[in-house]
Amino acid sequence: MKIDALRIYYLATPLFLILHYYFDLNLRVSIPGMPGGWILGYYFVCFAGGFVAFKSNVTGALFSLVESSVNILLLMLSILLPIYTIGSNPAEGIDFSFGTAELFHFLIVGSILLRSFYMNPLLTRQR
């Protein structure tokens, strides 16, 4: 069994879950306006993907591409939705933060997206 960075990233999902719920440090997923059950489901899909999707290089790369693309979309929505909704009730102000944790979240997900894209066997012809 070949161990690579993408598989380790997905198998380390319980570590991200512990950081999220016990230390309030969210480095993995932002789902705007959703209760915690959706976040737990997302963590479960990512952890299961570490086992299931990486049976072959092609499925692992495709899973990583889709998951990291969805993750970046959710991160951008968690930043943009409060800005877009400020027009409906300007008295409340903007309820979002973009700090160090969000920057690390973006860097981690962006790195995974780039790695899964450039190491994709469909592009490099390594099957």
Image (cartoon, rainbow, N blue to C red):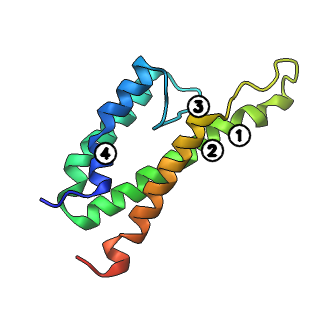
Give the distance between the C-alpha atoms of the residues marked 1 and 4, in whole angstroms.
27 Å
Left or right: residue 16 compared with residue 73: left
x, y percent for residue 122: 34, 75
Give the distance between the C-alpha atoms of the residues marked 2 and 1, in whole angstroms.
6 Å
Residue picked out by circle 3: 32
Residue that lies at the very extreme toward the left in this rendered image: 1
For residue 97, above or below residue 59: above
N-terminal label among 4 and 2:
4
The image quarter in which residue 100 lies: top right
Q: Which mark is residue 127?
A: none
N-terminal label among 4 and 3:
4
Secondary structure under the numbered disc 3 in the rendered image: loop
**Label 1 amino acid?**
Leu
Residue picked out by circle 4: 10
* Along the viewing direction, whichever of 73 and 27 lies nearer the viewer: 27
Residue picked out by circle 2: 76
Do the CB atoms of the residues marked 4 and 2 lie less than 8 Å apart? no
Q: Which mark is residue 80?
A: 1
